[in-house]
Amino acid sequence: MSSASTLITNIGELSTQDAAAETPVLQDAAIVFEGERISWIGPARNAPAADEMIDAGGRAGLPGWVDSHTHLVFAGDRSAEFEARMAGQAYEAGGIAVTTEATRAASDYDLTRLLLARAAEAAAGGTTYLETKTGYGLNVEEERRHARIASTVADTVTFLGAHLVPDGADADEYTDLVCTDMLAAVRPYVQWADVFCEKGAFTEEQSRRVLQAGRDAGLGLRVHGNQLGPGAGVQLAVEFGAASVDHVNHLSDDDVAALADSWAGWGAGAGAGTGIPGTVATCLPACDLSTRAPLAPARQLLDAGVQVALASNCNPGTSFTSSMAFCVATAVLQMGLTVQEAVRAATYGGALALRVHTGADRDGARAVGSLAVGHRADLQLLNAPSAAHLAYRPGMPLTGMVLRAGVPVRH
Ligand code: NIG
């Protein structure tokens, strides 16, 4: 049975973020979707008839946000830690233990309820593809429980048992546990393995073991790296062919060069978006602000030829917001990105970081993060005539209608 078609017409400015399109930003555009799939995009005057019609009223349209880095499975509150930080205290990885204690004490019902509420907030803000992580369990049973709960809500789940060495544990023994029993326990629920490679978390050698174990288990790889200071995270991520390295606040020239080299096999020009993807540098501006860290050098990375993603890093310690619009505004206002570069990083960039930018992803699911025929109908309309308003009117509630796989999740 064929699905009903819906035409959204009178879109003032449509940012498709389609790397292969001749004009990735269309004026006076229309889009048609059938079921979950986009079937036509072009000038409104040429739009085909459809079963239903929505008049965008000249508003701007863009892909739904792809939030490729969150930690949403948690309980408890760390606003006092945030206040202390704003009074001058430095952020340390140890705060993770506070959330671990609160999260272990929460029931399945409560954890699921909290996660659903956070995912709903993200969707209301325009996020249509959501990654989340474990990492506040830090023992076999809790990590398995968090992975299972996460898998019922998020589009894709990352195993971050290597987030912090629990109090009293031996770091090497704990790393072994992460690589063996813990990994086996979470494996049915996760697609990615991650490690926090940082002073105070996991050393280069321990991180290497985690990444190797993740790879051996058939998982995609990601790394938390170079957040609190210079370190081995970026180089390890590139060496292991990780899909992304996230945070990237403290980069050497060699780190930037290694990331850029990883994109050498990636098509440009007419072949844009084809070829073998390298390691995406995922910048987390809300986290940088909330920890008063130097903003990640997104401009320098883009200029060097690195593919960049923007993500919220929503978590209770360093970034308690899922607002991708806020991240986009910050990237434009503070990090030197143009509006379209920032929108691209928060949509197509996130999809690249999760390897869901083409139709050929792991589960055979449709591509997200850009608007093109055949891709999933993940779209947001802004209550504004252009995407520029995201930064021009920062902090304003501009999200209008949000469609996820052709289904309205916000009117
Ligand atoms: O991405 N960097 C490590 N993990 C989180 C912080 C988690 C926490 O402090 O609870 C982050 O910033």
Image (cartoon, rainbow, N blue to C red):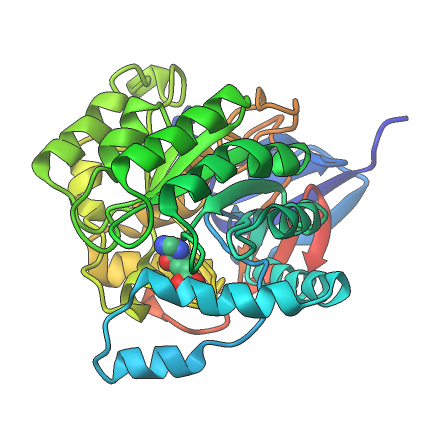
Quick check: 407 above or below 390? above
219 sits to left or right of 208:
right
Residue at horizontal 33 percent and vertical 24 percent from the top: 278
Residue at horizontal 31 percent and vertical 59 percent from the top: 285
Quick check: 238 above or below 230? above
Residue at horizontal 56 percent and vertical 55 percent from the top: 137
Query: Residue 51: image x %, image y %?
Result: 81, 40
248 sits to left or right of 168:
left
Question: Does residue 388 appear in the picture of this structure?
Answer: no
50 sits to left or right of 180:
right
Q: Quadrant of the N terminus?
A: top right
As rendered, which of 372 and 9 lies closer to the eye?
372
Q: Quadrant of the C terminus?
A: bottom right
- Dividing the picture into quadrants, the one containing residue 268 is top left
Of all residues, the one furthest to the right in this rendering is: 1
| Quarter, ligand 1 | bottom left
Residue at horizontal 30 percent and vertical 14 percent from the top: 265
